[in-house]
Image (spheres, rainbow, N blue to C red):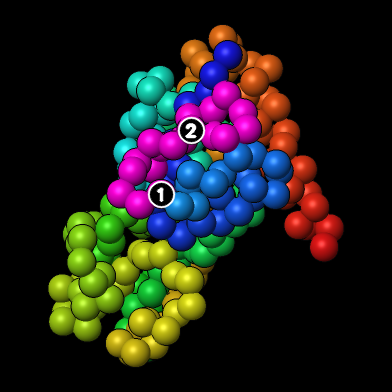
Amino acid sequence: MSLSVALTKGRLEKETVAMLEACGYGTERLKNKGRALVFPDTKKDIRYFLVKANDCITYVEHGVADIGVVGKDTLMEGGKDYYEMLDLKIGRCRFIVAGLAGANPLEKSGHIRIGSKYPNVALDYFHSKGRDIEVIKIDGSVELAPVLGLTDGIVDIMETGATLKENGLVVYDTAAELSARVIVNKASFKMKRDEIMEFISDLERMVNHAEEN
């Protein structure tokens, strides 16, 4: 029974394809893709397609994809109608709480305004601290918000921290550690359990091998 696998475009795509290749999957078409978006595995009965992160969840939830590979940041902000099966330990970064030097938003009393591309994550984090906040959704350079006085701080993804430093921002807390996850459509898991578990077991073996080395 064939599998359809949705891969998140960009950096995660490259790292996931490298893992699949190491597992012995036929990834030649994925590595030489041109403008195509759908690719057959050259060794197994699998079809891959490339999507944006938010769309990965949508395709899996609606059963167009049996399996998806997507960042935990997208899962924390998006839908929940799927099984989260495996942490691939790639694409590692973290959700951070940051603000101007000497102006920790966590220490501010009263009304707090937080800028974020991830309003649900920001709300969940501050509510877990017992704080009631106003989240202002920002799709562009979220670092600008506290610099220009729009917000008291931000919740954002950080990889190196270079952009924060360049804009005079300081990290005050880590809201969550992030990495790529394998998600599975609930109905597919019942109908194609063996095929899905074989795919996941292959990837899990690569994860364990990388951890050991």
* Element at label 2: strand
In this rendered view, identify the residue nearer to me: 178 or 180: 180
Query: Dot 2 surroundings within 10 Å: few (below 14), some, or many (20 or more)?
Result: some
Marks 2 and 1 in Cβ contact (< 8 Å)? no
The C terminus, quarter of image: bottom right
Please tell me which residue lies in front, 102 or 42: 42
* Residue at 54 percent of width and 34 percent of height: 41
Quadrant assignment, res 57: top left
- Is residue 103 highlighted in magenta? no
Among numbered discs 2 and 1, the one appearing first in the sequence: 1
- What percent of the width, then of the height, locates residue 208? 78, 49
Residue 141 location in percent, x, y? 23, 72
**Which image quadrant: the N terminus?**
top right
Residue 147 drawn above or below residue 89: below
Q: Residue at x 63, y 32 (%)?
A: 43
What are the residue bounds of the magenta stretch? 33-50
Q: Residues within 10 Å of mark 1 (few under 14, many from 20)?
A: few
Kind of residue at disc 2: Pro
Disc 2: which residue? 40
Please report the residue visible at 38 percent of the width from the left and 74 percent of the height from the top.
Answer: 98
For the residue labelled by badge 1, is the local secondary structure a helix, a strand or a loop? loop
Q: Which numbered circle lies on residue 169?
A: none
Say which of 77 and 87 sits in front: 87
> At label 1, which amino acid type do we have?
Lys
Kindly report the distance in space between the C-alpha atoms of the residues bearing marks 2 and 1: 11 Å
Picture layout, residue 167 above or below residue 133:
below
- For label 1, the residue is 33
The total number of labels drawn is: 2
Let me know if residue 98 appears in the view. Answer: yes
Q: Is residue 80 above or below residue 50?
A: above
